[in-house]
Image (cartoon, helix red, strand yellow):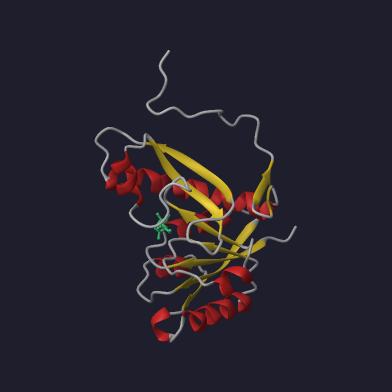
Amino acid sequence: MAKTRVGILISGRGSNMASLIKAAEASDYPAEIVTVISNRPAAGGLAVAAKAGIQTVVIDHKDYATRMAFEAKMHQALLDAGVDLICNAGFMRMLTGGFVDRWKNRQLNIHPSLLPSFPGLDTHERALREGVRIHGCTVHFVRLEMDTGPIVAQAAVAVMPGDTPDTLGARVLEAEHRLYPHALRLVASGAVRVSGEDIRFAPPTDTPAALFSPPLRP
Ligand code: GAR
C-alpha cells in the first residue's frame, strides 16, 4: 500500500518532528515525511530535517500582510510536495477557518496536556497549579478552535512530588516523542478513522483499564 505523504509544520526546535522522521525511517512505517515547513527562519528543527535529507521550506509569516496570504502560500507548498496529511509539531501560529477546512481530517496536532484540560500555553505550570496527579499529552485532529478536535491518542504522565514545570515538561516531552509516531501510525494505516467528530478504533485487548497516580500498592 502507498505510504501516506506527510508534511510537518514547525516553529521551533522540532523534537517532535525529529521523532516522526525517525519513526518514518522504518520500512514498514505507513507514512513518509516529504516536507518540513517552518514559519520561523531561525527554527532549530530546519537543520535537523535537512540533515535527515528532508525538503525544508521557510514561509515566514512576517513576510505576509494577512494570515490568509501566509496560509495560501503554505497550502501551495503542501500541494507542491504532494502532502496527504499535515502534522503540526510545535507549530505556534493560529490557523484560520479557510486553512483548517481545506485540511479537515487531514491535519494532526500534538499538545502537551490531556485535552480538553489545559488548552493553550504554559500547560505544565497550570497543571501543577491545579494539583492534578495525572498530566500528559494528546494527538488530535485539528479543528478551528485552538487545541480542540477528535482525539486520536493520549499518554498519561504521573505528576511527582517536587515536580517543577521543567521536570514535568521533560517527562511529558518524552511521552510526546513516543505518542506522536504511534498516533501517526494509527491514522496512516487506517486503524483509526474520524467519523464526524468521533474517532473509531479497535482498542488492543491489553490496554490497561486505569492508571493510578500515586500508584496502588497491595
Ligand atoms: C511540544 O511540547 C508541543 O507539544 C508543543 O510545543 C512543543 C514543541 O516542541 N505544542 C504546543 O504547545 C501546541 N499547542 P518541539 O518543537 O521540540 O516539538
In the displayed structure, does residue 56 sit left or right of residue 105?
Answer: left
In the image, what residue occupies the spot 40% across and 29% down?
213
State whether residue 41 is above or below residue 184: below
Residue 75, quarter of the rendered image: bottom right
Residue that protrudes farthest toward the right in the picture: 1
In the displayed structure, does residue 129 sit left or right of residue 172?
Answer: left
Residue 180 is situated, as x and y percent measured from the top left of the image, at 52, 51
Residue 26 is situated, as x and y percent measured from the top left of the image, at 59, 53
- Observer-nearest of 79 and 144: 144
Count of numbered labels shown in the rendering: 0
State whether residue 7 is above or below residue 208: below
Residue 80 is situated, as x and y percent measured from the top left of the image, at 62, 79
* Quadrant assignment for the C terminus: top left
Residue 39 is situated, as x and y percent measured from the top left of the image, at 43, 74
Ligand 1 position by quadrant: bottom left
* Quadrant assignment for the N terminus: bottom right
State whether residue 113 is above or below residue 78: above
In the image, what residue occupies the spot 66% across and 55% down?
188
In the image, what residue occupies the spot 49% across and 46% down?
178
- Observer-nearest of 75 and 81: 75
In the image, what residue occupies the spot 63% across and 58% down?
31
